[in-house]
Image: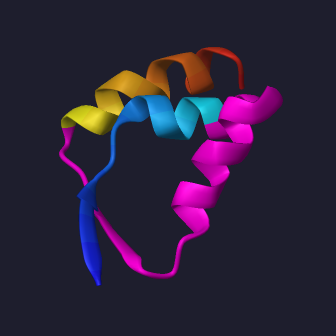
Amino acid sequence: MNRNFIEASILIYTALSQGEIAEQALQILEDENREFASSIFLKLEVLPKAIYNH
């Protein structure tokens, strides 16, 4: 299993679902051979805009 640190850009591009970059980001997230790690700072990058936009 491949362990990767996930960053906000992968989640943001996947959520926006626009174009080839979003498809590549989704393939990374759906890869069964990856295990993801993150830090508490990921929430600080992703949640404010999501909360603002409901």
Comparing 3 with 16, the one in front is: 3
Is 48 included in the stretch rendered in magenta? no
Picture coordinates of residue 10, whole percent (x, y): 49, 38
Could you tell me which quadrant the N terminus lies in? bottom left
Side (left or right) of 40 relative to 54 = left
Residue 30: percent from the left, percent from the top? 60, 68
In this rendering, position of residue 49 left or right of residue 44 = right
> Vertically, is 41 above or below 45?
below
Residue 25 falls left or right of residue 48: right
The vertical placement of 23 against 16, above or below, is below
Residue 45, quarter of the rendered image: top left
Q: How many marks?
A: 0
Q: Is residue 18 left or right of residue 40?
A: right
In the image, the segment drawn in magenta is 14-40
Instruction: Indicate the position of residue 2 as horizontal and vertical percent values.
Output: 28, 74
- Can the viewer see residue 12? yes
User: Residue at (21%, 33%) from the top-left corner?
Assistant: 41
Rendered residue at 75%/33% (across/down): 20
Specify the quadrant that holds the C terminus: top right
Q: What residue is at 51 percent from the left and 81 percent from the top? A: 32
The front one of 44 and 20 is 20
Q: In this picture, is 27 found above or below 48?
A: below
**x, y percent for residue 11:** 53, 40
Q: Tell me if I can see residue 15 in this picture.
A: no
Colouring of the image:
rainbow
